Image (tube, grey):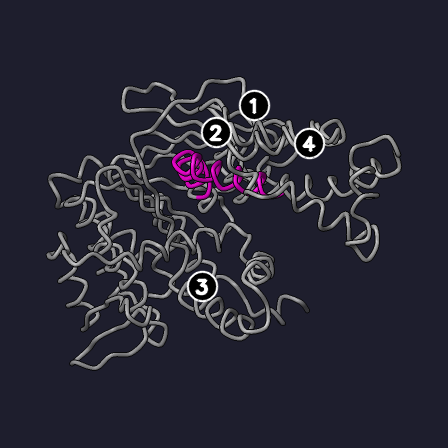
Amino acid sequence: MELQLRNIGMIKGADIILDGLTLIAGENDTGKSTVGKALYAVVAGLNNAHKYHDLDNRTDIIINSIMINNNLENAVLIKLKDKNSKIYTIYKKEQNNYDNINDFISNYIRNFFDEDIKDRNNFKIFCDKLKEYELYDYLEEYINKLETLLNNNIPDYKIKYSGIKNQIELEFIDSIHSFNTEKSNISILDDDNNKIIDINIENNKIDESVGIGNIEQKDITYIESPFIFYFKDVFDRYEHYFGSVVDELEIKRRKSRFINSALLNRIDNLFIKLTYNKTINKNNTISNYINSIVGGVVEYNKLNSKLLFKRNNNYIELSNTAVGIKSFAIIDLLLKSGVFNDKHILILDEPEVHLHPKWQIEYAKLMVKMAEELDIQILINSHSPYFIEAIQKYSEKSEKIADKTNFYLSEKQDDGYAVIKNVNDDIESIYKTLADAYRKLDEDTLWNETKK
């Protein structure tokens, strides 16, 4: 599979092969993370399209049902002013049973909602009642919308584009285009170099006139940082403190203010996988290797919904362990969840950041082992010479992964754009770029001296 990016974020162009283990090196602010975000947006958006659509559809049905209820009150009020209407006749006959006209309207409307109108059969009965009492015309706009939503006859290609569109908006908001450009493209090519996904974006809007295919990769996981466990603690505490004073919908509304972001969307997706702990671990060799590195075992306790680290028969919550242990723990829990297979893509954004050089090397070895034994596709961004060299040396020793490991260098150009190029034949260019920091250290003077 190949990912092609044109004018995405600060990236002018990138053609990235994903066939085993792919590593993108470069300094900060050279577009490395943008590659992972773009890939995640398309794959997650496409594979979750029907789930997103069903969720949006249910939400729209509820909203339209509420709108119908609100406007039904207005329609009844209007008909009450017509002394020849059926509703006015009923009101005059029964008005002694109500405190006032508003009381009548409120109680009378309940007769229209004997059953849930979100059910198709009940919806038809509801519409027949509206016609009988000459109220249908006042609500026709909302009725038509609700009928369309209940029928849910949306073409498959529209659902696909909607899923990708939602995920792209989440990842990039309104800044997917490169500087001073209004057109961008994200494409995915299959192993035969056929373009199966072709997303053209102009003025931050996706062109839906281009056909969209399917990809073999059915799941994707993005690991941004081992600090995700702290985010989870914040959510749990929020619900603990506010759950007793507000209802569930209000909790969700308030939480959405700070979880409706790309980062926390990916965290939510990741936590679902981390806590889906199967009893049988088919990857014992790799999991045992992780246990030997961190000196303990990670597990999810379903009874109290806690992620725990066990060492010498002592348990502590995973959120209280060293950051390095968390980094390995995430991989181990994903292994135990059973999500990894040859249809899975794993994205890691600078995984070495919180690791000692010794553990950077161990983590690199782990990635090679996973690519070799699980057949998953791994995309890694890094700027650590230790980690990159370890990936290079361990992959070269693997007969299965050696020719499926690709190295890229991301560099910012004079015009401010970044270009990502394959450097399989010139890996030394990566180390040369990263070594520039040491040369600067030798040549540079103190800041206060340069200011004089």
Q: Residues within 10 Å of mark 1 (few under 14, many from 20)?
A: few
Task: Report the side of 363 relative to 351 (left or right).
Answer: left
* Whether label 1 touches label 3, CB < 8 Å: no
Quarter of the image for residue 422 reads top left
> What separation in Å lies between label 1 and label 4 (alpha carbons)?
40 Å
Q: Is residue 416 above or below residue 145?
A: below
Q: Secondary structure at mark 2?
A: helix
Give the residue drawn at x 51%, y 37%. Answer: 119
Q: Position of residue 254 (x, y in %)?
A: 60, 61
Q: Where is mark 1, residue-wise?
A: 207
Q: Residues within 10 Å of mark 2 (few under 14, many from 20)?
A: many
Of labels 1 and 3, earlier in sequence is 1
Give the residue drawn at x 20%, y 56%. Answer: 278
Of labels 2 and 4, earlier in sequence is 4
Q: Which mark is residue 130?
A: 4
> What separation in Å lies between label 2 and label 3 (alpha carbons)?
56 Å
Q: Where is mark 2, residue-wise?
A: 159
Can residue 181 be seen at all in this image of the molecule?
no
Task: Report the side of 340 relative to 149 (left or right).
Answer: left
Point out the stretch of residues depicted in magenta. 37-63
Q: Amino acid at mark 1?
A: Asp
Q: Residues within 10 Å of mark 3 (few under 14, many from 20)?
A: few
Q: Amino acid at mark 3?
A: Asp
Q: Which mark is residue 442?
A: 3
Frontmost of labels 2 and 1 is: 2
Frontmost of labels 4 and 3 is: 4
Quarter of the image for residue 209 reads top right
Q: Amino acid at mark 4?
A: Leu
Q: Amino acid at mark 2?
A: Ile
